[in-house]
Amino acid sequence: MSTQISIVALTERPSADEHAALRAHLEAAGVVVEAFTPLTFPGIDAVAPGGQEVPVEAAGPYTAVLVEGSAKESVRELRSALNPDPQVQALPGYDVVVLERPKEKDAGKKRMLIMDVDSTLIGQEAVDELAAHAGLQERVAAITERAMRGELDFQESLRERVALLEGLGEDVLERVAAALTLTPGARELIAAFKAQGHPVCVVSGGFIQILEPLARRLNLDHARANLLGVEDGRLTGEVSGQIIDADVKAASLREWAKAEDVDLDRVIAVGDGANDRFMLERAGLGVAFQAKPALRETADAQVTLRRLDAVRHFAGL
């Protein structure tokens, strides 16, 4: 019995020769190709901070090759066959994502998108941007990088970084929030889900004082992040309440899926660091976006090009 599959192949090199190599790569792995449709999407212009629109980075065009077909292998087996080493593209220039073809009975069912924020929804790490105002950006960024690679305990590393921010004026939160830029395609991805009535959520190991204004401007359905302690107009160097770690991210996914009446297998989760692993594992599809090696090792799908809107194709949007 064959498995009905959909494949999305993402590339920044949309030539006929490259696509022929992709088709051969799929067929060599046992895919019976029934439809092979390349679609090219235009680049995104930058929007600088300070205007009415949410700032965004610029990015070039990309092509999504949408494939329908079948294979004797399961989806999981085919993913391994097409990309045996998750740290390297088996076919250079292409992110090849294998999906189970949606069943007709599920066509109208609600989906949910849940994303990490720092280096996923936005192009920065908020704690590093705060540290820059204290003259400690390099020191804090080094800790952040190790934590995102899974080399440090997240809670301990967060407390260590936040302690270095003690004494900063509270007004720095607003300045950092205003200077953040969306990852290219973030706005388009959110709009695609919202247009179909699918909820969009974010959960962050960053800070709610920075995330909340952005979540409101993007009309997100749910947002959760750490609360920085503030006394007499200055940061205390502590986090108030629960720390948003990997377990809390996964719990947030379950909580919001239940609240929105969305089956877990209809949830798409997107992140970039080790702190996102449990969230991606709980989702129907876990997407590693320009991710650290620890997350790439376990994710269902990878996007290495810098276009967050490419994730929409995994939901058929």
Image: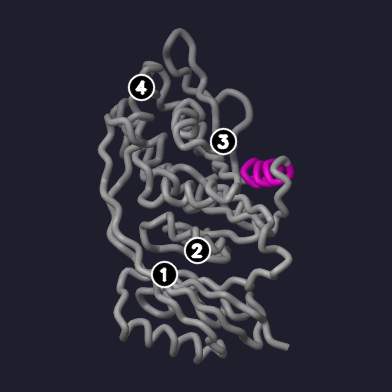
The residue pinned by badge 4 equals 172
Q: Work out whether mark 1 precedes mark 3 in sequence or the reverse, and give the earlier one.
A: 1
**Residue 3, position in %: x, y?**
67, 82
Q: Earlier in the sequence, mark 4 or mark 2?
A: 4
Amino acid carrying label 2: it is: His
- Magenta part of the protein: which range? 247-258
Residue at 63% across, 80% down? 77
Under tag 3, what secondary structure?
strand
- Residue 101 found in image quarter: bottom right
Does the image show residue 88?
Answer: no
Q: Secondary structure at mark 1?
A: strand
Q: Which mark is residue 131?
A: none
Is residue 240 shown above or below 111?
above
Element under disc 2: helix
- Frontmost of labels 4 and 3 is 3
Q: CA distance from mark 1 to mark 3?
A: 29 Å
Q: Earlier in the sequence, mark 4 or mark 1?
A: 1
The mark that comes first in sequence, 1 or 2, is 1
Residue at point 62% right, 44% down? Answer: 249
Residue 289 x %, y %: 46, 57
Amino acid found under the numbered disc labelled 1 = Ala
Numbered disc total = 4
Image quadrant assignment for residue 140: top left
Q: Label 1: how many residues lie within 10 Å, few (<14), some (14-19) or many (20+)? A: many
Cα separation between marks 3 and 2: 23 Å
Q: Is residue 144 left or right of residue 254?
A: left
